[in-house]
Image (cartoon, coloured by chain):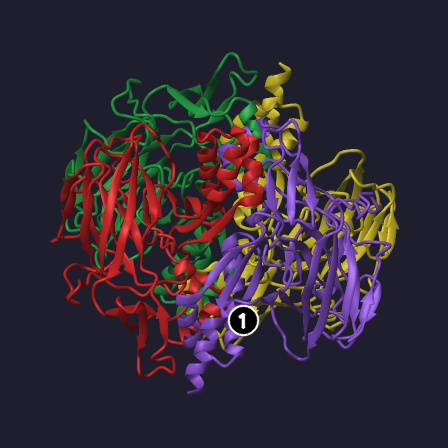
Chain colours: A purple, B red, C green, D yellow
Amino acid sequence: MAVRLFKPDHYHHTLGSHPPVLTIQPGDTVITTCVDARGFDEHDQPVTPRGNPMTGPFFIEGAEPGDTLVIKLEHLRPNRRRGWSGVLLAPNVVEPTDAGRLAQAGGYFVWDWEVDAKAGTARLNHPASPLHGLVLELEPMLGCFGVAPEGNQAISTATSGPHGGNMDYRGFREGVTVYFPVFVPGALFFLGDGHALQGDGEICGTGIEVSMEVRFSVDLIKGQKIEWPRGENEEYIFTVGNARPLDQCVQHATSEMLRWLEQRGLDTTQASLLMGQGVRYDLGNVFDPAYTMVCKMPKRLLERLLGLQTS
Amino acid sequence: MAVRLFKPDHYHHTLGSHPPVLTIQPGDTVITTCVDARGFDEHDQPVTPRGNPMTGPFFIEGAEPGDTLVIKLEHLRPNRRRGWSGVLLAPNVVEPTDAGRLAQAGGYFVWDWEVDAKAGTARLNHPASPLHGLVLELEPMLGCFGVAPEGNQAISTATSGPHGGNMDYRGFREGVTVYFPVFVPGALFFLGDGHALQGDGEICGTGIEVSMEVRFSVDLIKGQKIEWPRGENEEYIFTVGNARPLDQCVQHATSEMLRWLEQRGLDTTQASLLMGQGVRYDLGNVFDPAYTMVCKMPKRLLERLLGLQTS
Amino acid sequence: MAVRLFKPDHYHHTLGSHPPVLTIQPGDTVITTCVDARGFDEHDQPVTPRGNPMTGPFFIEGAEPGDTLVIKLEHLRPNRRRGWSGVLLAPNVVEPTDAGRLAQAGGYFVWDWEVDAKAGTARLNHPASPLHGLVLELEPMLGCFGVAPEGNQAISTATSGPHGGNMDYRGFREGVTVYFPVFVPGALFFLGDGHALQGDGEICGTGIEVSMEVRFSVDLIKGQKIEWPRGENEEYIFTVGNARPLDQCVQHATSEMLRWLEQRGLDTTQASLLMGQGVRYDLGNVFDPAYTMVCKMPKRLLERLLGLQTS
Amino acid sequence: MAVRLFKPDHYHHTLGSHPPVLTIQPGDTVITTCVDARGFDEHDQPVTPRGNPMTGPFFIEGAEPGDTLVIKLEHLRPNRRRGWSGVLLAPNVVEPTDAGRLAQAGGYFVWDWEVDAKAGTARLNHPASPLHGLVLELEPMLGCFGVAPEGNQAISTATSGPHGGNMDYRGFREGVTVYFPVFVPGALFFLGDGHALQGDGEICGTGIEVSMEVRFSVDLIKGQKIEWPRGENEEYIFTVGNARPLDQCVQHATSEMLRWLEQRGLDTTQASLLMGQGVRYDLGNVFDPAYTMVCKMPKRLLERLLGLQTS
């Protein structure tokens, strides 16, 4: 149950079987930092190339393929004042006939924001724009995190899969617990791509990108195999499907929720009926090569149900 | 500003240029009823074939192609006690390899619910199931409503499009205002497919289906052309994309929101930036031939922005 | 077995239950004409609005829902000299980032071709272009044809479905036999949208569009229900899936071929194995709201197989 | 211009930056072998785990990121007699409602074929089946080949991307020339997954899988950057899009063909017009995580065009 401080001195642009930077025990807590999506650190200095550089990997002792890694995001906080975001809608999230006028509006570029972690705000810092001074409330989150993927692959931090990766889901914020399948010994956990806040879908290609200080705890569920990332917050349990098109994300997330409820003792019919009337879906990334949909079930409903069953 | 009572004596299974049942004025309020998705009325009697039978069409005086029809759902309430729902997940919302075991679990069938509109609850009425007695809270909504489509088409109430139709979005509940493009003189508004409540996606193929009493008011925005349904509730303005795959729903809903914000005076860059960090998406139907995604923008953010602009 | 001459004097822009223009018997042959996609006739005069105007519908005596309509395209020939085609790739068939430069190249416009049915050629007639004078060989085909759809729908000739419609498949040329499901009494057969030739996918939004003289014969298979259009030429039997995305077209066409082979007496395993190693797919329309994929099986392979079975 | 013999003694299950097995020069020819998709060699012995094990990688001297690697498949020939194939249609290529009965027909299993490379035939060797003895003609091809991907990724041989990989396209047969983008120094070329023959789409999850002897020559186009694999045979030049859904494959392949024609000197309008009326599409894999579509242009048409231009 140690608290481990880790200051990164190099970063990775793929999630893969890279040499671990730290070995930790289930139950440990890690305090560390992430650079922003372009490799700028807390001093706003470039320390690694762009493209969602990852802190890690952390080797979790005892983790074996077929286990489930448990990550609780205990603390997420921007650790510098400059944030930045893409300004124009990505051409793939609008009707094809609209992509042309987006190109005419200037294509892809970014503007700065003043991030005040203490006040909990981001203020647009672009005097040339009528929106200069616009203030939004922070909702710090991690855009990209996960484990080394199956089959000795090394997969770009631009995309996502069963191992996690660049899911850009607003629900990955302070207080959430996330479950990843373990594919390699030690699981090899990576994290990065901090967003001070983000709209659903990351439809301008970025959130408000910023470096971040992070505290997370790890745990391990031995012998429990899951197929896709799962998570849990105060209100919901949820499952994550990463694929394209979104229809397929829905399929993965829905099947994973079905499996989860069945693992909790419901039969296929019970789980289906309950999902049919109680399910909620959230949208993660629709900008990257793989998109993300999240399937959520209210804990209140499941508790009520389990109550029913035991009576 | 009349209040019109209308008791239907026949129903339609397409949205098309059918003879109007009632001519109403912008500003009028209509009180009427809808049968359930299988054509059973408030006495639980079959009065028309199954398949989302529609009440209507209502002819709105003065509505011309290129206008926008405004429908406010003022009151939605189940008007009988028996509801019913599909029990098993639809084969298209799970991984293809899961479709087999759903088939083995019995395929498509429905169970009954006891709907108590006064208490605001639905209670599963299927003694053979361990879930018998499960109580869920009502969130009455309309699954299918809209106007006669473009180009003299008549489109099945099983699907959806720019004219609305079977969108199965939980947000179409009491208090919402919905905007439809007008394609034919009089707009020809239809409504039906009441759900006592429903999970996102209608992933078991139904909500808790029930007949409904409905009060709605109509208004007209002359000369304002919209491409897709829009809506508004206390917190959000929203746009609706109906298509397949979901990626394309996202494109339509996002482009329609962009157009809306531009119509309100933002330029492409301003609207994009704001959407990028402020947008939310909801999932409507993923069961029918066309799926539905909803793009939402918080009114609070837009008001703040308009404040910025005027200062 | 009559030969019927029919000269259209009005056209339809939906496939639906419109009043028949002619009642014909199974076994009859019809000689008629179609205007081009913009409603210009053999004299290059506009006689009806644009949008794939249809000749018909023809009422086939004895056709009832659940039967199969058999159409043989016996003769297809452009009946005027001016053809025209879209010039630029549609924004939805290129990468979203390419849509911008297509818009800059001028967006959607059309150029003329000189169609010489006797010589079997189309010559680009656009002196301002370096391609002026380019000669292509004719492969006359029908872009849009089919029957009145299910459930009293009337569906735009811009799209397609189980009833056929705007499939834009190069295989719908002289000599092909096409099978349509019958959804309404008399089947109500429509045809139009002649292409002097066309690339796969109709990726510039048109073939070389021209009015056409057409001779087709009709027949009826009583009591044989099919789900999607089927066809047959000298080399292949084929099935047609119309939907979006293309993945779903593949699913419909593949399932329909499986059903066809099973109806011919193969079991699921035999049909699967044979399809797995023998199947070919062609691409129809990828421009319209619904796309088209065609699943083909070589007759030679099936005959060989049937030989095996009888030995 | 050396001829290099290479006998593999280990294999890879990802395309990535693995240590080269042989360094070769542009102009060289390599004669080597591949095991089958399950890792069985020419003696029908298992020599490596299943999953499209790759021979290679070959380091091509002088290849740098931004160049194009040219591979000509000069000779492809099964080098043992036992082949095998999946028997049932994959659940993702049929309508979701059909997946259930495929599961009931027995799910995924394989049967053997007797491959006679000399006679050019494969004969089904499964006495329990009525199809036992069915004879198909060989069309040997490579299912999976390509180069190390961008950004130090290592990507499973189960899928595909801009680097090639598991494309399962029937056009990758003897005589074809294939162009790959170079992402890493030396390009690092891999090959494997021989199919004695295969239907389009690999819809039963396999072709007739067999080990193979292969002769290929390599060349290099310095400083020519391509985005997706390209190819060339006697009749066509072609481009390959690997993604999901198929709509996106179409977009990549079409954009890549547009770029190719523009690189040959056509402007956007000329290239579009020519593609619009001359293009053909083929279907590669629709079984794996990424699907494949191929966009083809007839050489005859391009030559004619270039003739026009020079006159």
> Which residue is farthest top?
C127
Q: Is residue C253 in sight in this rendering?
A: yes
Residue D147 percent across, percent down from the top left: 75, 50
Crowding at mark 1 (Cα within 10 Å: few <14, some 14-19, many 20+): some
Question: How many labels were placed on the picture?
Answer: 1
- Could you say which is closer to the camera, residue B142 or residue D94? B142
Q: Is residue B19 in sight in this rendering?
A: no
Q: Viewed as shown, does residue A8 lie left or right of A114?
A: right
Could you tell me which chain the residue with mark 1 belongs to? D
Residue A195 percent across, percent down from the top left: 67, 50
Which of the 4 quarters of the picture holds residue B147?
top left
Q: Is residue B73 above or below residue B222?
A: below
- Could you say which is closer to the camera, residue D176 or residue B113? B113
Q: Viewed as shown, does residue B133 lie left or right of D68?
A: left
Q: Which residue is mark 1?
A: D108
Residue at image coords 57%, 71%: D110
Residue C80 percent across, percent down from the top left: 33, 20
- Could you say which is closer to the camera, residue B119 or residue B264? B119
Which of the 4 quarters of the picture holds residue B16?
top left
- Could you say which is closer to the camera, residue C22 or residue B247? B247
Residue D27 percent across, percent down from the top left: 83, 41
SS state under label 1: loop
Q: Quadrant of the C terminus of chain B?
A: top right
Which of the 4 quarters of the picture holds residue C224?
bottom left
Q: Is residue B272 above or below residue B193?
A: above
Q: Viewed as shown, does residue B254 lie left or right of C164?
A: right
Q: Quadrant of the N terminus of chain B?
A: top left
Q: Amino acid at mark 1?
A: Tyr
